[in-house]
Image (tube, grey):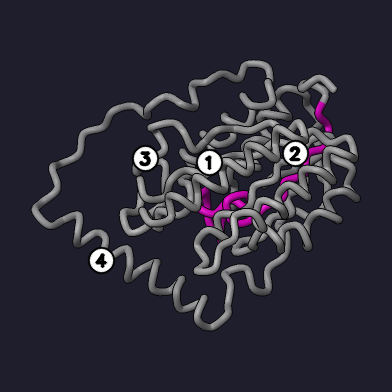
Amino acid sequence: MPSTEYRRYVALGDSQTEGLGDGDDTAGLRGFADRFAGHLDAARPGLLYANLAVRGRLAGQVRAEQLEAALALRPDIATVVAGVNDVLRPRFDAAEVAGHVEAMFAALTAAGTHVATVTFPDLGRVVPLARPLAPRLADLNDRIRDAAARHGVAVAETALPEAVADPRMWTTDRLHASAVGHERIAAALAHAVGLPGSDDTWTHPLPPHTAPAPAPGAAVAAELRWAAAFLGPWLGRRLRGRSSGDGRTAKRPDLLPFAATP
């Protein structure tokens, strides 16, 4: 199906696909999936769009909870973005995580759906304390690329541009993309699936900005503040067996006209 003929888009995933970092739970979340839906609707007005993502979900949970519902919606195009929450867990099996992602690729493409996905940036470029995770992310990205190649899935290589290390691409928790970051991801997906008017400008550096030189020790102090504000609560939830997505359901479970997006 030509890219301009996409009429039914379904997004599967976790907090990034739900839109954390782009808006809030009071005013509403936008995120890359909503923004990508906007690109699709601009190419072919009248798009129907559903977003099944729920924050905190592991790749296996995305598969178990969202795949069947996605298939029932008979999408022309779907995005599958999952695995970062697994990378952050003490026990991480790249083959198992990639297996869940590939199973979703296989089921959706077998149903005639065009699927797109992304690769994940090295979090250590944004959060120095996360540098030990780099080998995990590189391994998972390689497996996602291989699985995508086997099933004809389009890959937006969002892991690669230098711009991903720009702090303006991230929220203060440095784990979720900012509004600017989400728009870049959406533009990357539009480029990956060949939408009219898309190009590689999403890879370009952000415009320069001036900032005062940090005071001595500022970087260390910033890391300590980040750990207290975000890492501590995250670890606390893990120790209690809790998730940020407990009690939550998909924000947009039904295919609705994109024009109805808040």
Categorize mark 4 by other alpha carbons within 10 Å: few (<14), some (14-19), many (20+): few
Q: Which residue is mark 2?
A: 258
Categorize mark 2 by other alpha carbons within 10 Å: few (<14), some (14-19), many (20+): many
Q: Nearer the viewer, mark 3 or mark 2?
A: 3
- Tell me residue 105's x, y (percent): 77, 43
Query: Which label's residue is closer to the chain start, 1 or 2?
Result: 1
SS at circle 2: helix
Q: Quadrant of residue 25?
A: bottom right
Q: Is residue 225 left or right of residue 31?
A: left
Q: Quadrant of residue 151?
A: top right
Q: Residue furthest left?
A: 216
Magenta region, residue range: 6-27
**Nearer to me, 214 or 96:** 96
Residue 88's place in the image compared with 159, above or below, is below
Residue 174: in sight, yes or no? yes
- Tell me residue 30's x, y (percent): 59, 47
Which residue is drawn at the image coordinates 70% and 36% (left, top)? 148
At label 1, the amino acid type is His
At label 4, the amino acid type is Leu
Q: CA distance from mark 1 to mark 4?
A: 26 Å
- Tell me residue 236's x, y (percent): 46, 78
**Pointers 1 and 3 in contact (CB under 8 A)?**
no
SS at circle 1: helix
Asked if the stretch drawn in magenta spans residue 223, the answer is: no
Q: Which residue is mark 1?
A: 182
Q: Which residue is mark 4?
A: 224
Q: Is residue 12 left or right of residue 213?
A: right
